[in-house]
Image (spheres, helix red, strand yellow):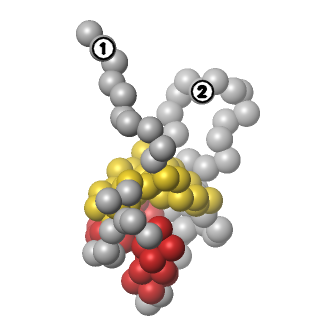
Amino acid sequence: MQKHILVVMTNCPPGTEAAFNEWYDKTHIPDVLKIKGFVAATRYTVSDPQRSDAGPAHRYLTVYEVEADNLAEAYAAMAKGLKDATISPHLEMPPWSYFFTQIGERRIQAG
């Protein structure tokens, strides 16, 4: 089975973080993980320090792990599976998202 990740970067308006994060963690991720091929999800928030003073354009990052021999089918299943999903009113649109396909083995620090 080929391994992929879906990287999604998002924002929410100031003052809505708690509601946004609750929706993302308790509704959205469980909805996505019901979709065939989507096997795991990890969320992150931007941290300090950063390499640049400019800062990133998005505050939140979600990395979905996808296992599928046909990524187009996994994408179609995602589109179908989320067609009627509840979307938070606090999700700033559009989110930034891209699929990536693994091309090398995972390496870990020796020693």
Q: CA distance from mark 2 to mark 1?
A: 26 Å
Q: Decide: few, some or many residues near mark 2? Use Cα within 10 Å; few <14, some 14-19, many ≥20.
A: few
Residue 50 bears which disc, if any? Answer: 2
Q: Can residue 62 be seen at all in this image of the molecule?
A: no
Describe the element under mark 1 as helix, strand or loop: loop
In x, y percent, where is residue 76?
A: 48, 80
User: Does 49 appear above or below 80?
Assistant: above
Q: Which residue bears the numbered disc 1?
A: 110
Question: Image quarter for residue 51?
Answer: top right
In x, y percent, where is residue 55?
A: 67, 36
Circle count: 2
In x, y percent, where is residue 56?
A: 65, 41
Q: Is residue 79 left or right of residue 42?
A: right
Q: Amino acid at mark 2?
A: Gln
Q: Amino acid at mark 1?
A: Ala
Quadrant holding the C terminus: top left
Farthest right residue in view: 54
Farthest bottom residue in view: 84
Front residue (pair 75, 82): 75
Q: Decide: few, some or many residues near mark 1? Use Cα within 10 Å; few <14, some 14-19, many ≥20.
A: few
Q: Is residue 111 left or right of residue 97?
A: left
In the image, which is nearer the foreground, mark 2 or mark 1? 1
Q: Can residue 95 be seen at all in this image of the molecule?
A: yes
Q: Are marks 2 and 1 in contact (CB under 8 Å)?
A: no
Residue at image point 38% right, 54% down: 3
User: Does 97 appear above or below 36?
Assistant: above
Front residue (pair 3, 20): 3
Residue at image point 51% right, 73% down: 72
Front residue (pair 17, 87): 87
User: Does 84 appear above or below 102?
Assistant: below
